[in-house]
Amino acid sequence: MSVVGPGTKLVFCEGKPDSLDAALLNELVTKANVLIVPAGGKQGLRAFIDGYLARYGNTPPQFIAFRDRDFDVRPSDIPALQALPGSKPVFASHCSCVESYLLEPEILHMYWLERSQDPDGRRGETPPVAEIAQWMEESAREIRDYQAVRWALAALKPGPRWPEVRTTWTEGSGHLPDSLAMDQCTENALALVTQYGDQTAGVNERALRERVEQFARQFESDSFWQQRLYRVWFHGKDLCKAMQRQRPNDISLRHFFQWAAKEADLLAHPDLKQLADKLN
């Protein structure tokens, strides 16, 4: 059992102790009496919390939980933490995942410039911020249809008591399918719908196609791209993978995230500032 003294606050998060989630939370914590507790996958988060708190009997310490929003709930119109349904204080990120906060052209430029000074880590001339921003947007456009299909699948969940419809036929976020074309993504999604449809008639081909069309229109609008809303709606791990596909011989984005968690101005994001206030 971890030593928890009077006034200690527990902060449950996804992942392992060396995960990016824990690293980001550590940067937001300023008080010594806050203990970050990685809990593994999001599906078992609430059960993990119950089991962890049971060791304290009738006097559990104060706690909150923070997890990636993923595709479980649509982002709010303003950047704010999203309280998830239930009796526990579980909050989801405004962006899809913690990686999304760090995928900023200016931060990537800073990292690239630093690596370019290191003979062991040199990756050629550091591109200007505008070129990195273009790389990011082109990668986002490549996964646009795939993200629309993932959101359409997520929107098919019949209700809070039903298990979620799988939002991808790959190994998960950060593992892109071989084809990102809309027709192929839709066909793969239909296979998931057919499997789920054995449980409820509300999940069917017509419902899927209607939602795919809805999200495709949203993600094709000029305002969506002008406001760079793909940074909020598209999954950061998928965007990262698409960027690596485009430029496989450039900087390692995996190493970049660990560096950026320490160097980025996390409090510039209103929802992360809100989270920091809750942590401390």
Image: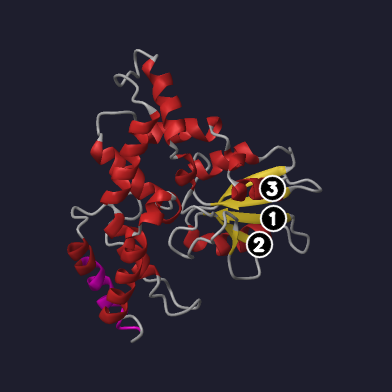
Q: Is residue 190 visible?
A: yes
Seen in the image, is 113 located left or right of residue 92? left
Please provide the residue range marked out in magenta: 188-199
Amino acid type for the residue under numbered disc 3: Leu
Of mark 2 and mark 1, the one earlier in the sequence is 1
Crowd tier of the residue under label 3, counting other residues whose Cα lies within 10 Å: few below 14, some 14–19, many 20 or above: many
Of tags 1 and 3, which is closer to the observer?
3
Of mark 1 and mark 3, the one earlier in the sequence is 1
Q: Gap in Å between the C-alphas at discs 2 and 1?
A: 8 Å
Residue 244 image point, x, y percent: 29, 38
Quarter of the rendering occupied by the C terminus: top right
C-beta proximity under 8 Å, tags 3 and 2: no
Seen in the image, is 148 located left or right of residue 261? left
Q: Which mark is residue 89?
A: 2
C-beta proximity under 8 Å, tags 2 and 1: yes
Most frequent secondary structure within the magenta stretch: helix
Q: Residue furthest right?
A: 6
Q: Is residue 213 above or below residue 20?
A: below
Taking depth in this image into account, of 211 and 236 the one nearest to the observer is 211
Seen in the image, is 19 located left or right of residue 239? right
- Residue at horizontal 37%, vertical 37%? 133
Residue 117 image point, x, y percent: 39, 14
Residue 72 image point, x, y percent: 46, 65
For mark 3, what is the residue?
279
Q: Quadrant of residue 245?
A: top left
Crowd tier of the residue under label 2, counting other residues whose Cα lies within 10 Å: few below 14, some 14–19, many 20 or above: few
- Residue at horizontal 19%, vertical 52%? 178
For mark 1, what is the residue?
63
- Residue at horizontal 37%, vertical 17%? 116
Q: Gap in Å between the C-alphas at discs 3 and 2?
A: 12 Å
Amino acid type for the residue under numbered disc 2: Pro
